[in-house]
Image (cartoon, coloured by chain):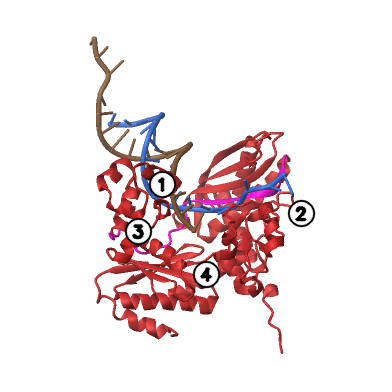
Chain colours: A red, B blue, C brown
DNA sequence: TCTGGGGTCCTAGGACCC
DNA sequence: TCTGGGGTCCTAGGACCC
């Protein structure tokens, strides 16, 4: 059945007829790989890996690659035999494509609910207040079908009264065959109890390796045991976070179904180098580029930063080589989003943390204590020259941002040479920018 | 040879104040 | 002679998420 916008509207009229709020977690399967496949059908059915920056390791895997036993983070060189033997395909990551596909995915979800929270690039929470469970299942199916039809991405839909249970429902849904990837969990149903009993404690949202270890030492090995154990024990021995998780497993909501997108509180831009370097100029070049990028993102969200950290480090995996890592914070006189001011500070910081004789492999900048631009202080009335300079810089930033937006990232940057520097990342097999560049539009053969 | 790049929240402990 | 204790703010680091 094809669901239309009218259908969704007619359902929403029945809001308020049921008393329980529901939330759906819609998650794209193997997101990066699925994005690549949406434009390159030859990849379907084959083992596919998408690689990190520098093509260093695996950050996304198709089901076929998972079946061959390849884990996340596997270094690329270990996959060569799979390429030969199973015709596995290794792709460089294409973040411009993934970001654009993510936006389209959320556009589709937006037609099903007024409240959609993009939780990460590949998954969103969708508030679904007041439906009957039968209707909710249909709505879940409509979401799966619409995303498949319109953006060619496979999704799983997990529906439950709160986010923790919706996460669990989603894990289960994703394992089902295409077209049936919807799972609805009612807190006390037999289905839910069974699912909780077969869910390892470490697979519960919010429980990572450390907590998992500590819980298992107390004899808590699965989600059901956590749900049923003493609330006091959790409160005393662990944190309020875990207590919240426990309550949600019982069906009690401890957080809203969706949250307003808040502007970021910090912003990091960092990269590993294509090749480690002991030249300060190389590293300075990388940092200049990162500052430009970070400041641009800061201005895009209309924020200013109170402080900035610059950090550098050698390759921690090269244990036989001398190691050094350091970072230093710069506090601005006043919160700023001015690239030139940040470049100036970054340069000084780098000189202070730089040590000769080490091969640096990664560098980055972090902007901290971000606040709204409008809350920043007005230009200094008692220092007209400084005030004038600020206004001029602000205009320059505006022009730079709009040119970069039209002509592509880093068309215009401050203080960086345009030569290809040693730190530039390696990308050997990147797909075209199918959706964000006219020249890379996919071609369709004419008959 | 070769191992990502972002984020958030919580807690413990020190500094400081009264 | 005698040497508190509570509150707040800040920071570093841990743990988690994708």
The reply to whether label 4 and label 1 mark residues of one chain is yes
Task: Identify the residue position indicated by label 1 in the image.
Answer: A212
Find the distance from the CA under tag 2 to the CA under tag 3: 56 Å
Looking at the image, residue A9 sits to the left or right of residue A283; the answer is left
Front label number (2 vs 1): 1
CB within 8 Å, label 4 to label 1: no
Q: Of A437 and A38, which appears nearest the observer?
A: A38
In primary-sequence order, the first of circles 2 and 3 is: 3
Front label number (2 vs 3): 3
Query: Does residue A117 appear in the picture of this structure?
Result: no
Magenta region, residue range = A251-278
User: Is residue A234 magenta-colored?
Assistant: no
Task: Identify the residue position indicated by label 2 in the image.
Answer: A419
Locate the N terminus of chain A by quadrant. Answer: bottom left
Q: Of A134 and A16, which appears nearest the observer?
A: A134
Task: Identify the residue position indicated by label 4 in the image.
Answer: A103
SS type, badge 4: helix
Q: Which chain carries label 3?
A: A
Find the distance from the CA under tag 4 to the CA under tag 3: 33 Å
Task: Identify the residue position indicated by label 3 in the image.
Answer: A196
In primary-sequence order, the first of circles 4 and 3 is: 4
Locate the C terminus of chain A by quadrant. Answer: bottom right
CA neighbours of label 2 inside 10 A, class few (<14), some (14 to 19), many (20+): few
In primary-sequence order, the first of circles 2 and 1 is: 1
């Amino acid at each position: 059945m094809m669901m239309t916008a009218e259908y969704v509207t007619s359902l929403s009229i029945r809001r308020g007829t049921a008393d329980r709020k529901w939330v759906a977690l819609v998650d794209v399967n193997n997101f990066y790989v699925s994005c690549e496949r949406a434009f390159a059908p030859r990849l379907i059915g084959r083992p596919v890996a998408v690689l990190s920056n520098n093509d260093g390791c695996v950050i996304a895997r198709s089901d076929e690659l998972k079946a061959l036993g390849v884990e996340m983070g596997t270094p690329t060189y270990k996959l060569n035999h799979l390429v030969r033997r199973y015709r596995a395909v290794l792709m460089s990551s294409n973040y411009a494509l993934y970001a654009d596909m993510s936006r389209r995915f959320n556009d589709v979800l937006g037609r099903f609910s007024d409240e959609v929270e993009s939780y990460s690039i590949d998954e969103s929470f969708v508030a679904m207040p007041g439906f009957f469970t039968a209707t909710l299942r249909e709505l879940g199916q409509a979401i799966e079908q619409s995303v498949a039809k319109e953006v060619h991405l496979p999704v799983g839909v997990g529906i439950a009264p709160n986010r923790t249970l919706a996460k669990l429902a989603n894990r289960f849904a994703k394992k089902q065959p295409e077209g049936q990837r919807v799972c609805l969990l009612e807190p006390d149903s037999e289905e839910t109890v069974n699912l909780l009993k077969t869910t390892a404690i470490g697979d519960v949202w919010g429980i990572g390796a450390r907590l998992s270890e500590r819980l298992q030492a107390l004899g808590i090995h699965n989600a059901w045991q956590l749900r049923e154990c003493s609330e006091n024990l959790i409160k005393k021995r662990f944190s309020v976070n875990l207590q919240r998780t426990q309550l949600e497993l019982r069906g009690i909501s401890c957080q809203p179904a969706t949250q307003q997108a808040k502007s970021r509180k910090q912003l990091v831009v960092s990269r590993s180098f294509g090749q480690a370097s002991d030249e300060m100029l190389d590293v300075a070049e990388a940092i200049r580029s990162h500052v430009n990028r970070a400041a641009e993102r800061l201005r895009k969200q209309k924020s200013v930063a109170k402080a900035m950290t610059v950090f550098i480090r050698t390759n921690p995996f090269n244990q036989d080589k001398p190691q050094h890592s350091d970072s230093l914070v710069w506090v601005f006189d006043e919160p700023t989003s001015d690239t030139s001011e940040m470049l100036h500070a970054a340069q000084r910081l780098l000189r202070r943390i730089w040590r000769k004789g080490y091969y640096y492999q990664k560098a980055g900048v972090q902007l901290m204590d971000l606040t709204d631009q409008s809350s920043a202080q007005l230009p200094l009335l008692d220092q007209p020259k400084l005030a004038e300079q600020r206004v001029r810089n602000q205009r320059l930033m505006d022009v730079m941002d709009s040119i970069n937006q039209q002509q592509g990232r880093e068309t215009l940057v401050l203080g960086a040479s345009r030569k290809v520097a040693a730190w530039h990342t390696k990308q050997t097999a990147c797909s075209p920018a199918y959706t964000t560049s006219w020249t890379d539009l996919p071609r369709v053969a004419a008959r």
